[in-house]
Image: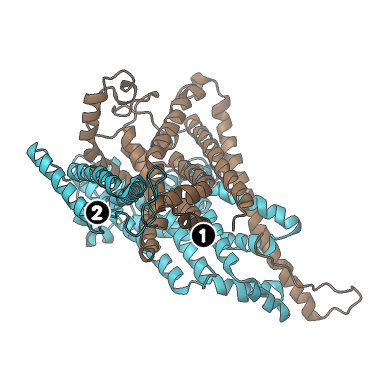
Chain colours: A cyan, B brown
Amino acid sequence: MHGTISSAQKPRNILTSAQLPKYTSIAMLVASMAVAFGVLALFESATGLMGVLLGSLIYLVSNYALSASVEGPRKAKDRLALNIVTAFFILALFPLVSVIWGTLSKGIARFDGEFFGSSMRNIVGEGGGAVHAIWGTLIITGLATLISVPIGILTAIFLVEYGGSGKAATLARLIRFLVDVMTGIPSIVAGLFAYTIFSILMGPGTNNGLSGASALSVLMIPTVVRSTEEMLRLVPNELREASYALGVPKYRTIWKIVLPTSIAGIVTGVVLGIARVIGETAPLLVTAGITASMNLNPLANPMATLPVFVYYEYTTPGADPTPYIDRAWSGALTLIIIVMGLNLIGRLIAWKFAPKAGR
Amino acid sequence: MTTDTREPRVDEPSSAPTSLLRDRRRFGDSLFKGVATGSGTLILIILAAVATFLVGLSIPALTAPGDELPYGPFWSWVFPYAAGTVWAAALAMLFAVPVAIGVALFITHFAPRRLAQGLGYIIDLLAAVPSVVFGLWGINVLAPMVQPIYGWLNSTVGSWPVFSLIFGGQVSGTGRTILTVALVLAVMCLPIITAVTREVFLQTPRLHEEASLALGATRWEMIRQAVLPFGTPGLVSACMLGLGRALGETMAVAMVLSPGAGFHFQLLTSSNPNSIAANIALQFPEAFGLGRNQLIASGLVLFVITLIVNMAARAIVARRAEFSGAN
């Protein structure tokens, strides 16, 4: 990548063509930031954000100009691309850091024993907690997992093990397409679907935990199918054939060879699927509803869940909004910890037990 | 199909004596196959049920005369919401796509190889943040942060001829405008676009890249010659997947936006066009009777919009999978 022969100039010696030393970029970045903050300080309007923005802009332009004059336009463009791409990456990190920091700093106020020890029953104003919502989230997500995991895994087995040829292949192609379509169902539409089914089965206006769980299943099944399918495809065909050669029937081969080989990946997919639906708000808002007291029965009466709890605490505060908003942030913090924890567990399982892929 | 899962030949001439073992084995096989096929078919049924129930419960609202509906005639009622949904999602794409491409390029081609995977996980963490938390963040952190910028934009370019259509109007004092919503949506669909784009960029044939570098191209020239042309179809479908998510996102919009009536393009006012999903979430708990039907019908409209976008995305991906014989 050292050749800087531009067509307009006479060929230069590759080994001696001008190059900026490696520390140039860092030195220029520091200098640009210093200039930016200096200029802003003169106008006495320096906020950190503006300084960083201005500094980055100065750096982008000056680095390009310097490189263009010393190294030639092609290398300068290369540098500009590197700088812009890096800037975009840092820009993408900003909301992540900001969300986590904001939730931590605002949620810590009510992140206490009472929050995890009491429900909102008979609470107006201060105090109270989200234990009913945490239980609701666990029950509803657990039910959704119970519904979606068998369906999802069996469907993936059908797609990979049986959907290879003949009539099954057509069905498999259709299912694969529809699973993709299902991935794109807006969560609120899944909620409306569960709501309509349950209002037909159990009378109009039914709010209960099971309808919430079925709404979440609609969202969770496609994730489980997709991840399991990918994992099953990673199982080397030689393993299956070795098993067949020993006279093992197909279903036992799947059960004893294919599934154990890919179980880590499947578990990871399930955990990530749970992490996806556990933070869903909109479908639970229309299906499970909200209540102030503990309800452990998913078949009757509304059931509070953590995301819906956060939403209602924030949008319908009392006369003094502070305790409500504090509770909302603590709920958000709990939710983020649960979801990120699940993600971490999923990644850890994947990393620890990953089958050695060929690539 | 890449995996070839041929069954071993077990069928023999029918005259052969069938042992007990054989029968049991066949029973187990057909049972297992039946269960697997059944659960695959169940997915078809679920999706058909979603469509049927939505259509069935929408019909009362679609057929009732306009003055009987609680929110007014259906199509003129739903239009501003549909337009608002598309407008907010399109703006979000405008912010998210360049950043997502940049991030994906950074992770696949610029970052140190050893760090790359870890950096990918970090961006994926954004996908783990629940939407209700993004809603809280949008109201409390992002909106106050961008409000001064909105004020400045409004006072400088808000009175220019064409710009006034977008930046004009009475600037919002809280920053809870459709532009903030678009920013939040951009953050929310960034991870999915990045993840897909990253995969696509990684699949660029190694030989194309090395050929380009061997001809003396700089890294950026190599990316323009080898990576981007190869990845364009994948990029398009990644964007459409992100668009699908932005269209269907509910809570962030419902919480952050301060909605108003009707549709207009102005980004900085406190009376914004609402989205279908957010409107359902806001109205549904209080609605009853025909009102619920009307909201469900608007959900059907949203379903159709996202369905079209997602199907288009998948069609592009599928076509690419068939023709990319590069490796």
* Mark 2 residue crowding within 10 angstroms, few (<14) / some (14–19) / many (20+): some
Q: Residue A25's mark?
A: 2
Q: Which percent across, then down, holds residue A299?
A: 48, 54
Using residue A174 as the reference point, say whether residue A339 is left or right of it: left
Q: Nearer the viewer, residue B196 or B221?
A: B221
Q: Amino acid at mark 2?
A: Ser
Asked whether residue A148 appears in the rendered view, the answer is: no
Which residue is rendered at x = 67% and y = 75% of the image? A252
Q: Secondary structure beneath disc 1?
A: helix
Quadrant location, the N terminus of chain A: bottom left
Q: Secondary structure beneath disc 2?
A: helix
* Mark 2–mark 1 distance (CA, rounded to whole Å): 29 Å
Q: Which residue is labeled 1 in the image?
A: B206
Which residue is rendered at x = 11% and y = 38% of the image? A45
Q: Which percent across, then down, holds residue A79?
A: 32, 50
Q: Nearer the viewer, residue B261 or B207?
A: B207
Using residue B50 as the reference point, say whether residue A70 is left or right of it: left
